[in-house]
Image: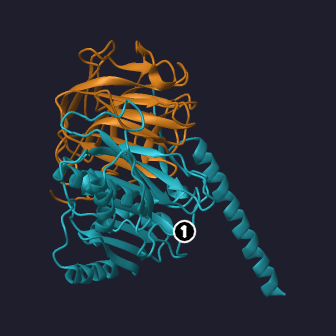
Amino acid sequence: MILKRNLRLVVSLLVVVGLAVLVTGVALGRGGAQQKAVAVPGTSTACVSSSSPAVPTVDVENASAAEVDLIRAAAQRVGATLVTAVRLAGPPDSEFTPLAGYPGDRWLYVEVRLADPQSCRVEQDWQAARLAGAVRNAAAAAALPIPFGYTIIGVFPDGSRAEPISIAIGAPIGTEPVALPDRAAEAARIHRAVAAAGLQLRLLEFAGVDGAAVLRTQAVGAADDLARDWPGLLQQIVGNRPDSAWLVEIDGADGAPIKAFANSPSTAGTNGWTRPDLRVIDREVTSGG
Amino acid sequence: MGNPFIRSPWRRGVVTALGAVAVAASALALASTATAAAQFGSRYLDTSCCTLYGGRANIDSVNLNPSTALAAARVEADNAGAYLVQSGFIRTQNIGWANCPDVSTRHRFYEALTPSGTYCNSYSDATLTRAAVLRLSTGPTNWGAYLDGVKVFDGPVGFSTASGYLAGDEMNGTGGPMTARFGAGDTPWQRALNIDASSYYTIQGSFVFRAPSDKWSIGSLPSPFTISGP
């Protein structure tokens, strides 16, 4: 009986404390410094998938056989396994013109597979970037018409499409990702770094002829802690490699992705993703205008 | 280049003392090793003035010179939430990554934080750049980022018209100072009057934001105006 009464007391106390914390949080949320979470559904779909031997289907408009071959070769060279189709045409509209110093008159339309609108698409966007950079460099080297940008078109399983995203390539022509000289040594380094960071390595692959590292790791800590520690973790895992292509995903204890980030030197581009509820905003009350 | 990674806490916002309006300050990130908070100096508009379709400004006299971390001078539109688009100049020192690629020397850039992910590309440096972010009719929430009149990004950023639009500087870390001038030459700081920006209005009045509140010098309108700090 006494135990039951004590238990009820403990539960009551917990409820009271919980309510107090809740009320305090709401009060802080309306007043001083606060953090705001964005209420958008998350995803359990990994950002990084295990590669498959798929080769993109290439449908090229107004192009020579040499361009078709070039695109197919580039897709294989960068390991564009999530790219389902590539089309070469003019830019999406007349406002996309080459910046001074960035020659070109064509545009790549890259279709990628997406699981659903909420899924992490870092790898798809990264592969599209790598492919666009590789095609541009190869076209310039072969004295063929040069694409100066690309559009990513996400295609869902039911055939519907995401809103396209169009990007002008930023890297100077000829910028290639620095290839890994020794994959075995890099794999050993990554294994050590991941372990030292307190993470588990769920997947490690080297994509394309340049050996771009693709990592999926898992942590046991709280997701918000991981998001906060992300830069340090990223540095620890990948090292100082701004001229190499890579993609890193960190999953939470539940196996769902928390953050992912990818580097594509051939386009001077990066793309990333954070679990929606961790897209935190710090708000500060100030005197404003 | 030194430590190439910096913190990516998405972005900071500021709220006026009236508590009614939030204005974006940044998506650029804090250095993992430079733990000082991000610092901002800007002129901004919010929805109290008008419907915000973005706008443009020339940016010149850019001295992005923090002794640590990251500096940027840009125009930006946001939803007072998690999403924004911005373009202008960026540079890091002793670190390399924001949400962006290697910008250890000064580059032009755009950055878009969108529901589907973050996108950032860097472009060669230039003496002067006309930076613009504009609401476009290419999609229900599409915005474009422009450098010198050339579109470099077009995509769904998660909001239609903006909650805030600004011209300003950002610095992460404790170094400095940095200075940028907005609205020089033939393109003062302007806002777009409609979707696809077929016409512009030269901004005559705006709010000022400083963080820290005592360490930025923000010039007055009309354009051009200089922002220095911290």
Is residue B97 visible in the rendered image? The answer is: no
Q: Colour of chain A?
A: cyan
Q: Residue at x 37, y 65 (%)?
A: A80
Query: Which color scheme is applied?
Result: by chain
Which one is in front, B196 or B31? B196
Chain to which mark 1 belongs: A
Q: Amino acid at mark 1?
A: Thr
Circle 1 sits on which residue?
Answer: A45
Q: Quadrant of the N terminus of chain A?
A: bottom right
Picture quadrant of residue A10: bottom right
Residue B36 is situated, as x and y percent measured from the top left of the image, at 30, 50
On the picture, is B223 further left or further right than B10? left
On the picture, is B151 further left or further right than A276? left
Picture quadrant of residue A214: bottom left
Say what secondary structure mark 1 lies in. Answer: loop
Which one is in front, B133 or B139? B139
Is residue B103 visible in the rendered image? The answer is: yes
On the picture, is A229 further left or further right than B122? right
Q: Colour of chain B?
A: orange
Residue B201 is situated, as x and y percent measured from the top left of the image, at 43, 14
Q: Is residue B87 above or below residue B130?
A: below
Q: Is residue B126 above or below residue B193?
A: below
Residue B116 is situated, as x and y percent measured from the top left of the image, at 50, 52
Q: Is residue B212 above or below residue B190?
A: below
Q: Residue at x 20, y 58 (%)?
A: A176
On the picture, is A47 further left or further right than B229? right
Q: Quadrant of the C terminus of chain A?
A: top left
